[in-house]
Image (cartoon, rainbow, N blue to C red):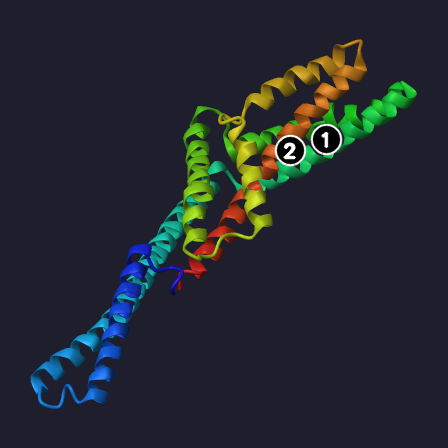
Amino acid sequence: MWRETPAGLRVLWLALWSVGVVLLGLGWWGDQAGFWSSKPFITNVFSSLTAVLFGVPLALIVLQRLGLTQAEAVEARAAQRLATTVVEDLASAAPRLHPGPLSDLRDAEAELLKVERAAQEAIRQWDSTQDEESLRALRELVSGGTLDKALADFRSAIKPGRQAVPVVAEVSAHWSFLNTTVRSRLLETGGTWLAPPLAAQIDEMVQLVRADPYMDGWLRDLDMAIRRFHTASDLSTALRHLWTQLEIGYELAEAVNQLSDLTAQASRVLTSSSH
């Protein structure tokens, strides 16, 4: 308590107690000398003044501490209410990143991962063998309908384009505010913040989505990569370009899919701590 007391109040406390000690000594001397025996009024005034000099500083410190504690409690409740509001807004915005069926999004994620892994394996085999047969599995996935279905499911679930931009901006803004301003206020007031792994996951997913607010840039690049894969003489470079775009698409589908669950978890954590 003493360390948290303002310097000015500490000086006043010491000054008043010093005077009080002096008066206490004078009072004791007066008792010994019989000085107060014929002066009842002055005796009462003197003893009251001495008591005030000891009591007032202590009362000021206690009241100051009580006021500070109450102010901190009010600030903590305000920070918690703000956190609850922002995280609920974030959790309600995240599912709108995929206005289409969630099942299509999950199918797109799984199918893109399958083709991406095939491209990765094709690169490994092609670099070591330069054998056209090493590309057969990838060509079947690219030309046999698997990739086309993945892209159709992605478009059905996410509906990339201009209409995606406002939702991406909303999710990004809510998370940025929550992860900076709200986080600081919660920690300063002793509130509960998200576990580091959960916060890191959300941040990573938001960064992936924010990288392409239209969520369709990789589709155009993938189309070019597919054409190069079918026609280019430098297959090593074409394979890597194709794999890069497939990886971007898979990570984007994964991010959109996971953000709904991750933000819901964050909402449960921050809202439960307010009760």
Residue 172 in sight from this viewpoint: yes
Give the image quarter of residue 154. top right
| Disc 1 packing (10 Å; few <14; some 14–19; many ≥20) | many
Disc 1 vs disc 2: Cβ atoms closer than 8 Å? yes
CA gap, disc 1 and disc 2? 8 Å
* Front in this rendered view, residue 209 or 42: 42
Residue 124, given in percent of the width and then of the height, sits at 84, 26
Residue type at numbered disc 2: Tyr
> How far from the left and from the top, in percent, is residue 13?
29, 65
Q: Earlier in the sequence, mark 1 or mark 2?
A: 1
For residue 174, which numbered disc appears in the image? Answer: none
Name the residue: 34% across, 58% down: 72
Which image quadrant for residue 44? bottom left
Lateral position of residue 10 relative to residue 101, left or right = left
**Quarter containing the N terminus:** bottom left
Q: Of the numbered discs in the image, which one, if any, rests on residue 250?
A: 2
Res 156 seen here: no
Rendered-image quadrant of the C terminus: bottom left
Q: Nearer the viewer, residue 159 or 76?
A: 76
Of residue 113 and residue 266, the one placed in the foreground of this image is: 266
Q: Which mark is residue 116?
A: 1
Q: Secondary structure at mark 1?
A: helix
Q: Is residue 233 above or below residue 172?
A: above
Q: Secondary structure at mark 2?
A: helix
Residue drawn 23% across the image and 70% down it: 56
Answer above or below: position of 177 versus 138. Answer: below
Q: Position of residue 239 (x, y in %)?
A: 76, 20
Q: Identify the residue shown where x is 52% and y is 40%.
A: 101
Amino acid type of the residue that numbered disc 1 sits on in the rendered structure: Glu
Please name the residue shown 32% across and 61% down the image: 10
> Could you say where residue 237 lies in the image, as x and y percent from the top left?
77, 15
Q: Nearer the viewer, residue 43 or 119?
A: 43
